[in-house]
């Protein structure tokens, strides 16, 4: 397989995907148009990878001719795939950056529900880390600054009353009926 | 509607997916609120997220509905909500290919890209470049140039990466931005450095000089980004490979210095680059191996994996270089990451001693079921290599392989096992029966047609010659009853071989054949009928010609000849001898077994080398009417490696002629050679008929000239000849930089080494799978025998190799392998002599002081027998 040595190129990442604990796709990006062009092939590949990796947290594997690095958190699985010749540590840098950025953005609640509640932020984070297969940024701090996304203040119990009131007040100020609705529903639970 | 949505969100308790039951039509319906004023950023954001989520799930959007949603989305540019704007960029990128008229947002994006909000600028550039084509690119060229050198890193990076994406589409436009990229490369930001380096390389990669300069500059100035370092290492090692630079090159020094970088990523990249260099010696490897050894004990799995994978590769070429790491590798064989453990074990199998084999095999069998197919193949390949190294271990291996064969696994994996078992059977006669038994068991339940036919072929070849051939018949006939057409046909062929070899089985085989003649498939019936008729004749010669040893012609050649024959109807029957022979498959080509083969690449059916030559020669008018090309030799070097001109010769043999093809290369960049030809002076009565000169020979562009020679007709035994060769040409000096030649030149010549034509050039290798049958088939009409004493040869191995390379014939029945500790051996050789006469040689060798050799030659032509004996003596 090393007959063709690695052509120097910035195109490092072939695919990145996030799956839930049943192997369902939550987010997938394929950067090599020749790799699994159809959705069916992509999902088959993801399922295959998931079946081979979800039991043991082994960090790295080699499947279907690609090096795959991965990481799991509660009910989520994060994968970054690159060519067989790719520097494994570069792929690892991408995976770590993705995970750290999301962890910061979601205030350490890296689990499916929080992730889905902030899906817009997740899309933006992935977009800031990889652009068309090129590593755009590898420092989570930079990614968070660039995305400048504020996660939904979801679990009320973790915040002080003052904080909640503050955010709600700003919400009410520039909002419509819906927000008052949510606020009313939320207050009794306090 | 709005309330309904919120309720649904609320109900679907935590842990479940709020996007799970999204309906495309409902979402598109919701997207209408994009048109409401004032814009509600929060809700619009939510809907855009849903659209992107659906696209990401593979939901299909029709052009009309996508365009409609896209146009509605463009209104959201009026809002100043940051996240909403960023999601608009994403939507633009996602919809670029499915919606129409996406260029409508160009002006909005251009505004954002040049605006004051730094947060928008980078992403806007990336979105804009996604929807831009070559013509529009020129319109925004000014902005792109500014953005590349912008002092905000995210803007500069975005512009550089987007430019890189567009190199494929509009190389000429992006090329003009080289100066800006150059400036960006000296930025302080590590990512900008990296992206600028990448873009510069892509723009200059065809200009080796420019790449070298760039590399020199950056190695001196020193970059900060580890990614950029990795990129530089790759560029450097590619340059080294192209220029065939050695370890004294400054490029190599640079790579080696990276072994001391503070980033593990760079250190690993450098070590890996050194390991992959084609001509690396053990001394150069040592520092790379020792950093890899350190990585083996890293707490990071990815680093351990990378290290052991690379060591595994080193072990293939330089097992001794890795032995120093054996202790570290031992610690990894119980690693919880099974990929790492597998790689460690297979590496140890290559470097360790025979005594550790049993222990390692035991270890690996404890978790072989847990690892992926790719790694199972690696294991099988390691075993295969091991069997060659330690033949005595074959029983352990065979056991292990048969267990693996029973497990689940994909095609590549099973094929690797079957190949490995077959090679063990061929190498070790004593393992034949157990091996065949395992294979029989496997085809009882085998879903891969290719493997089943391969095994049936193997059974047909080896089965009849075992002590109890009858026990295989049942397995083979089961296939006729149960399998697909291709397998049934293969089974019929295998059965026929049993019938032909074993007289006592013949009646039963004939009965079974009768049954096969009623098969539903044409091919199966045809084969059965054919074999039935051949077998009923009960003639050894027929059996040998039509059952054991099939056609030895090249299939594309046969197709071409038959086509030609049908185009020109004639009374004469088609003559098989006019068909070029298939070049004997070089079965012993045990090339580097690539681990984890890139199984995804489709195997291209490369045309045989000889077929290519045949085409090339047929295109030259002087060489018309020579008949089919009989044999092409391996290239012979007629110059030293590093001289002004490099010339090598390929000898093409035809029925009564030979063509000498001289591949010449001019290594002087200040000379242009014209009218190049090689003058030949034969020592025997060979006659040079034609010279076809090469019109011109530019610097480092190889070209060929040819000579046509007639073989002496009156003396068929004159097979060897020596030619003294001189290259003659017209030299025109030229400017090394532009390649512009002077107007006038002068004649010059250059003496080449002598070229030998030997008996081997007249014989084509042909593999007879069943030598005994072929021997009987030719008969002893023209048999001759002579005894020779080879005084200078000290071992049987040496004698065997000498004979094979001298006669250029194909060893059969694996008789080229001399068993250890024997002092006599029989070598079987088969070939076809120029003109289409089969020739077989049996050489009995005995080792005393020197080697005594008794050669028996059989052929269909008396002259050929004489030629061979005369040339041996």
Image (cartoon, coloured by chain):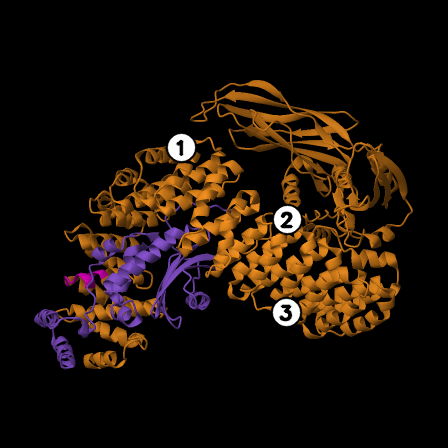
Chain colours: A purple, B orange
What residue sits right under mark 1 in the picture? B209
What residue span does the magenta drawing correspond to? B79-86
Do marks 2 and 1 share a chain?
Answer: yes
Quarter of the figure that contains the N terminus of chain B: bottom left
Residues marked 2 and 1 touching at CB (< 8 Å): no
Q: SS class of the residue under badge 1? A: helix
Tell me residue B206's x, y (percent).
41, 38
Question: Chain for mark 3?
Answer: B
Number of dots carrying numbers:
3
Query: Within the magenta stretch, is there residue B83?
Result: yes
Tell me residue B446's x, y (percent).
63, 69
Residues marked 3 and 2 touching at CB (< 8 Å): no
What residue sits right under mark 3 in the picture? B446
Query: Within the magenta stretch, is there residue B98?
Result: no
Quarter of the figure that contains the C terminus of chain B: top right
Do marks 3 and 1 share a chain?
Answer: yes
Of A110 and A37, the residue lying toward us: A110
Mark 2 vs 1, N-terminal side: 1
CA gap, disc 3 and disc 2: 27 Å
Of B338 and B178, the residue lying toward us: B338
Mark 3 vs 1, N-terminal side: 1
CA gap, disc 3 and disc 1: 56 Å
What residue sits right under mark 2 in the picture? B590
Q: Residue at x 25, y 75 (%)?
A: B29
Judged by depth in the image, the label closer to the viewer, 2 or 1, is: 2
Question: Chain for mark 2?
Answer: B
Q: SS class of the residue under badge 2? A: loop
Tell me residue B199's x, y (percent).
33, 44
Label 2 packing within 10 angstroms: few (<14), some (14-19), many (20+): few
Q: SS class of the residue under badge 3? A: loop
Residue B74 appears left or right of B603: left
Question: Chain for mark 1?
Answer: B
């Amino acid at each position: 397989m090393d007959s063709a040595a690695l052509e120097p190129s910035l195109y490092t990442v072939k695919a990145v995907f996030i799956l839930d604990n049943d192997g369902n796709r939550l987010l997938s990006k394929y950067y090599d148009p020749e790799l699994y062009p159809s959705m069916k092939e992509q999902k088959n590949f993801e399922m295959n990878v998931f079946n081979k990796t979800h039991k043991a947290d082994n960090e790295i594997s080699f499947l279907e001719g690609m090096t795959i690095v991965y990481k799991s958190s509660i009910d989520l699985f994060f994968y970054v795939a690159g060519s067989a010749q790719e520097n494994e540590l570069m792929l690892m840098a991408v995976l770590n950056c993705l995970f750290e950025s999301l962890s910061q953005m979601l205030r350490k609640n890296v689990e499916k529900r929080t992730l889905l509640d902030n899906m817009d932020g997740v899309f933006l984070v992935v977009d800031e880390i990889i652009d068309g297969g090129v590593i755009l940024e590898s420092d989570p701090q930079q990614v968070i600054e660039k995305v400048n996304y504020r996660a939904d203040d979801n679990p009320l119990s973790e915040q002080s009353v003052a904080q909640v009131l503050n955010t709600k007040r700003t919400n009410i100020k520039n909002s419509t009926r819906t927000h008052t609705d949510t606020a009313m529903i939320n207050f009794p639970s306090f | 509607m709005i309330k309904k949505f919120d309720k649904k969100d609320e109900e679907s308790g935590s842990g479940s997916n709020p996007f799970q039951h999204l309906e495309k039509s409902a979402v598109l319906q919701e997207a209408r609120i994009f048109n409401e004023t004032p814009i509600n950023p929060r809700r619009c954001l939510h809907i855009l997220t849903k659209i992107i989520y659906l696209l990401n799930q593979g939901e299909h959007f029709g052009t009309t509905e996508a365009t409609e949603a896209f146009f509605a989305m463009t209104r959201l540019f009026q809002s100043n909500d940051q996240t909403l704007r960023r999601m608009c960029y994403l939507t633009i990128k996602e919809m670029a290919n499915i919606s129409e008229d996406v260029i409508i947002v160009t002006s909005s994006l251009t505004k954002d890209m040049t605006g004051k909000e730094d947060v928008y600028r980078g992403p806007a550039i990336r979105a804009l470049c996604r929807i831009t084509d070559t013509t529009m690119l020129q319109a925004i060229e000014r902005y792109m140039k500014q953005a590349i050198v912008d002092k905000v890193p995210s803007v500069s990076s975005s512009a550089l990466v987007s430019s890189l994406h567009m190199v494929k589409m509009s190389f000429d436009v992006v090329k003009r931005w080289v100066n800006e990229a150059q400036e960006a490369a000296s930025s302080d930001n590590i990512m900008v450095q990296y992206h600028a380096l990448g873009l510069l390389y892509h723009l200059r990669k065809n200009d080796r000089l420019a790449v070298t300069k760039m590399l020199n500059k950056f190695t001196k100035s020193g970059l900060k980004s580890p990614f950029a370092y990795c990129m530089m290492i790759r560029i450097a090692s590619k340059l080294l490979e192209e220029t065939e630079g050695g370890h004294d090159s400054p490029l190599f020094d640079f790579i080696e210095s990276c072994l001391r970088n503070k980033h593990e990523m760079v250190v690993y990249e450098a070590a890996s680059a050194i390991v992959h260099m084609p001509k690396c010696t053990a001394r150069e490897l040592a520092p790379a191996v020792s950093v890899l050894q350190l990585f083996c004990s890293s707490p990071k799995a990815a680093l351990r994996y990378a290290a052991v994978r690379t060591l595994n590769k080193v072990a293939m070429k330089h097992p001794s270089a890795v032995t120093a790491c054996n202790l570290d590798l031992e610690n990894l064989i119980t690693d919880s990451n099974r990929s790492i453990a597998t790689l460690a074990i297979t590496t140890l199998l290559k470097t360790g001693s025979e005594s550790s084999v049993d222990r390692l095999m035991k270890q690996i069998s404890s978790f072989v079921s847990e690892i992926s197919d790719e790694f199972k193949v690696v294991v099988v390949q390691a075993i295969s290599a091991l069997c060659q190294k330690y033949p005595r271990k074959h029983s352990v291996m065979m056991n292990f392989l048969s267990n693996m064969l029973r497990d689940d696994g994909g095609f590549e994996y099973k094929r690797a096992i079957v190949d490995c078992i077959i090679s063990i059977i061929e190498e070790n006669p004593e393992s034949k029966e157990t091996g065949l038994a395992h294979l029989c068991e496997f085809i009882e339940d085998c879903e891969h047609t290719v493997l089943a036919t391969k095994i049936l072929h193997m059974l047909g070849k080896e089965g009849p010659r075992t002590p109890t051939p009858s026990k295989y018949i049942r397995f083979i006939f089961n296939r006729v009853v149960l399998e697909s057409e291709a397998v049934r046909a293969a089974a019929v062929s295998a059965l026929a071989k049993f019938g032909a070899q074993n007289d006592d089985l013949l009646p039963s085989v004939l009965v079974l054949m009768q049954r096969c003649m009623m098969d539903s498939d044409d091919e199966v019936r045809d084969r059965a009928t054919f074999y039935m008729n051949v077998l009923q004749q009960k003639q050894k010669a027929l059996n040998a010609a039509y059952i054991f040893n099939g056609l030895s012609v090249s299939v594309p050649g046969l197709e071409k000849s038959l086509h030609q024959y049908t185009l020109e109807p004639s009374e004469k029957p088609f003559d098989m001898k006019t068909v070029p022979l298939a070049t004997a498959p070089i079965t012993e080509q045990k090339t580097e077994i690539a681990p984890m083969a890139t199984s995804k690449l489709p195997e291209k059916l490369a045309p045989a080398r000889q077929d290519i030559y045949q085409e090339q020669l047929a295109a030259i008018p002087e060489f018309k009417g020579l008949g089919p090309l009989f044999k092409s030799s391996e290239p012979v070097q007629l110059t030293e490696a590093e001289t002004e001109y490099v010339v090598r010769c390929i000898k093409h043999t035809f029925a009564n002629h030979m063509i000498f093809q001289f591949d010449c290369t001019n290594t002087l960049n200040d000379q242009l050679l014209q009218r190049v030809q090689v003058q030949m002076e034969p020592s025997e009565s060979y006659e040079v008929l034609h010279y076809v000169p090469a019109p011109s020979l530019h610097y480092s562009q190889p070209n060929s000239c040819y000579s046509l020679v007639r073989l002496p007709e009156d003396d068929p035994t004159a097979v060897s000849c020596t030619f003294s060769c001189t290259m003659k040409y017209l030299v025109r000096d030229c400017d090394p930089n532009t390649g512009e030649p002077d107007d006038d030149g002068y004649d010059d010549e250059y003496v080449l080494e002598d070229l030998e034509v030997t008996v081997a050039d007249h014989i084509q290798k042909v593999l007879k799978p069943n030598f005994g049958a072929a021997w009987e088939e030719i008969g002893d009409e023209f048999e001759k025998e002579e005894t020779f004493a080879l005084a200078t040869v000290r071992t049987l191995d040496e004698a065997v190799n000498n004979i094979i390379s001298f006669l250029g014939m194909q060893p059969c029945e694996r008789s080229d392998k001399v068993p250890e500790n024997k002092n006599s051996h029989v070598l079987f050789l088969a070939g076809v002599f120029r003109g289409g006469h089969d020739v077989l040689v049996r050489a009995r060798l005995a080792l005393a002081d020197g080697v005594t050799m008794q050669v028996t030659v059989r052929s269909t032509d008396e002259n050929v027998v004489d030629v061979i004996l005369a040339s041996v003596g």
